[in-house]
């Protein structure tokens, strides 16, 4: 009777130990086999692939399932101004796929020295010393960024904050409606009447800052 009791006690001790050892063995096996062997990038056309990989911080030999996708995304977006969104996929046994969505340049400012390229949200994407490569974009006048820096949203001072909001909403509406290629000049000197040139033949007056998308829709109807 006592012998059977001792056997039961040993069994009760050995089972948890065996389970623990099995878990350790599985963890060690996973860490050995699921290591990063390759990093690829998809969706980029402007941003350099190698620069994205370096910015991600992912290195060959990293444990595949220890990669923090949120941190990787933040690092890349902070380092690469053209990158708007990032997602990270894992493909067994050892591949990491970084999918990026890039911002699209739609317009530019000239501050007297440099040309500053912006997307539809007024995020500064790039600085250029000449007009090369920007002629097809919208030339924006009437507001000048203060201390512009690549990667930042344009800042023009508190007194011009409404201008910047009006501008961003108008650029977004033009982009979403596929009209940016027809607009070559946009002026917001008067915050109560943003204007833009359409296809070199129409001067469109938007009036005060309200119902921007609705006004663009009305303009499209008028064109038809």
Image (cartoon, rainbow, N blue to C red):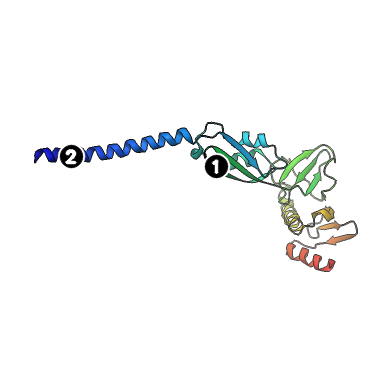
Tags 2 and 1 in contact by the CB under 8 Å rule? no
Is residue 9 among the parts visible in the rendering? yes
For residue 91, the mark is 1
Which quadrant does the N terminus fall into?
top left
For residue 9, the mark is 2
Against 47, residue 221 (above or below) is below
* Viewer-side residue, 172 vs 1: 1
* Viewer-side residue, 40 vs 54: 40
Q: Residue at (74%, 66%) from the top-left corner?
A: 214
Where residue 110 appears, x then y in whole percent? 82, 43
Where residue 100 sits, quadrant-wise, is: top right
Which quadrant does the C terminus fall into?
bottom right
Q: Residue furthest left?
A: 1
Against 198, residue 74 (above or below) is above
Question: Which of the two discs, 2 and 1, labels the residue nearer the N terminus?
Answer: 2
34 left or right of 20 in image? right
Secondary structure of the residue carrying numbered label 2: helix
Label 2 to label 1: alpha-carbon separation: 45 Å
Label 2: few (<14), some or many (≥20) within 10 Å?
few
Where residue 11 appears, x then y in whole percent? 21, 39
12 left or right of 170 in image? left
Q: Residue at (19%, 37%) from the top-left corner?
A: 10
Where residue 188 sits, quadrant-wise, is: bottom right
Is residue 57 among the parts visible in the rendering? no
Where residue 155 appears, x then y in whole percent? 71, 46
Q: Residue at (84%, 61%) from the top-left corner?
A: 204
């Amino acid at each position: 009777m006592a012998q059977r009791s001792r056997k039961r006690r040993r069994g009760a001790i050995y089972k948890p130990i065996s389970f623990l050892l099995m878990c350790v063995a599985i963890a060690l096996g996973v860490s050995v086999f699921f290591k990063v062997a390759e990093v690829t990038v998809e969706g980029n056309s402007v941003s350099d692939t190698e620069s994205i990989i370096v910015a991600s911080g992912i290195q060959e030999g990293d444990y595949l399932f220890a990669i923090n996708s949120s941190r990787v995304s933040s690092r890349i977006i902070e380092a690469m101004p053209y990158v708007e969104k990032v997602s990270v996929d894992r493909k067994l046994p050892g591949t990491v796929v970084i999918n990026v969505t890039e911002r699209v340049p739609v317009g530019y400012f000239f501050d007297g020295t440099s040309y500053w390229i912006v997307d539809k949200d007024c995020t500064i994407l790039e600085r250029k010393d000449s007009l090369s490569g920007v002629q097809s974009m919208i030339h924006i006048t009437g507001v000048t960024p203060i201390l512009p820096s690549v990667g930042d949203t344009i800042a023009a001072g508190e007194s011009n904050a409404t201008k910047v909001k009006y501008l961003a909403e108008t650029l977004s509406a033009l982009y979403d409606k596929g009209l940016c290629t027809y607009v070559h000049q946009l002026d917001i000197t008067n915050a109560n009447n943003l204007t833009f040139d359409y296809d070199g033949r129409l001067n469109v007056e938007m009036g005060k800052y309200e119902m921007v998308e609705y006004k663009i829709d009305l303009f499209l109807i008028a064109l038809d």
